[in-house]
Image (spheres, rainbow, N blue to C red):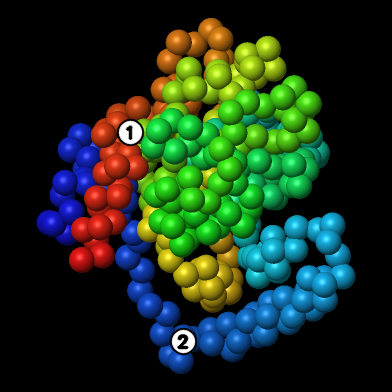
Amino acid sequence: MEKFTNWRDKGTGIAPFQPPTTQKEAIFFNKSIITNIIFSIIYLTRCILLVPLLVLSPFINLRLLFLTGFTSGRIKIDYQVNGIKRSQLSKDPQRYHLQKGYLYVVNYSSVLTAVVLQYVAQDNRSIKYLIPSESNDLYELTFLQFVNFTMSGQSLDVTQYGTQIKEISNKDWARYTWCLFAEGTCSNGKSILPFEIGKASLELIFDDSICTEVIPVTIKVNNSLVTPLGGSSWRLLWSLILKHKCLAKVKVHEAHSLINEMEALDGVRESLNDGDKYKLVSKSLGIVEKRKFVNEFRK
């Protein structure tokens, strides 16, 4: 669209904030309508059966359980780790999943990224979702806060959704799996946005005696399931039911040293973009420009 050319990167031609254009599902003329109805009944039934847990167990992340009642079995994950053969992964996949005591920098293109991380972490209860603000501060979000920030808040002001963290103790470092969404806001996944946090800020929060490297993790989902402007969670879940499967491609890249690499985060950003620095959008297309885009898009 011509009116949005200001938010199209001049070097690559990529418009990172543009939401996907998908055809509406013609439900009553869909040749697989019977299959759709069957799958819908199955997954709605599963969620109804989960309701008693909302009352009976205070020890489970029930909101997560309720959400993944819809998505469980709907997401197919293609998991890759740099330097590890698929044959090795298939023998012992848990061994190569995301571990506690590591800092992973994850690209941010869909709310489903948070769900996918639950499947590829050794302990899904240990995940910490970290998102930087425009002022370079770092905020910690729960799973539900991440969903609300992405879908309701258009991922623009994390200060309204998370809790600021100023330092991380050695004890906490070892107890959790740290997932940093360094772009600070959601895009459509066609490139990697500029990072809203710098190396100096990271070093103030993460003691270099415990955090010496960062590991990039790229997660790509179907183009129709990216959520750069948020939207309705229920519509997204219904889309998952109708489409039957979401293919999530996960790739864990080679680690970058925070100590030895002066431009470590630039290297991380390039890795997240499959090593193609020429398809990275300009560093001017960050949260400030996305906010302008959202305002213009909704006129």
The quarter holding residue 94 reads: top right
User: Which quadrant, please, contains the C terminus?
Assistant: bottom left
Mark 1: secondary structure: loop
Q: Residue at x 84, y 57 (%)?
A: 59
> Which quadrant of the view contains residue 256?
top right
The residue indicated by pointer 1 is: 280
The quarter of the picture where the N terminus appears is bottom left
Q: Residues within 10 Å of mark 1 (few under 14, many from 20)?
A: many
Q: Is residue 248 visible?
A: no
Front residue (pair 163, 131):
163
Q: Name above or below for residue 294 compared with residue 261.
A: below
Neighbours of disc 2 within 10 Å: few (<14), some (14-19), many (20+): few
* Residue at image point 12% right, 56% down: 2
Q: Is residue 34 above or below residue 293?
A: below
Question: At label 2, which amino acid type do we have?
Answer: Ile
Considering only order in the chain, which callout, 2 or 1, is on the residue closer to the N terminus?
Answer: 2
Identify residue for label 2: 27
Q: Amino acid at mark 1?
A: Leu
Q: Is residue 116 left or right of residue 173?
A: left
Kindly report the distance in space between the C-alpha atoms of the residues bearing marks 1 and 2. Answer: 38 Å
Q: Position of residue 14 (x, y in %)?
A: 26, 44
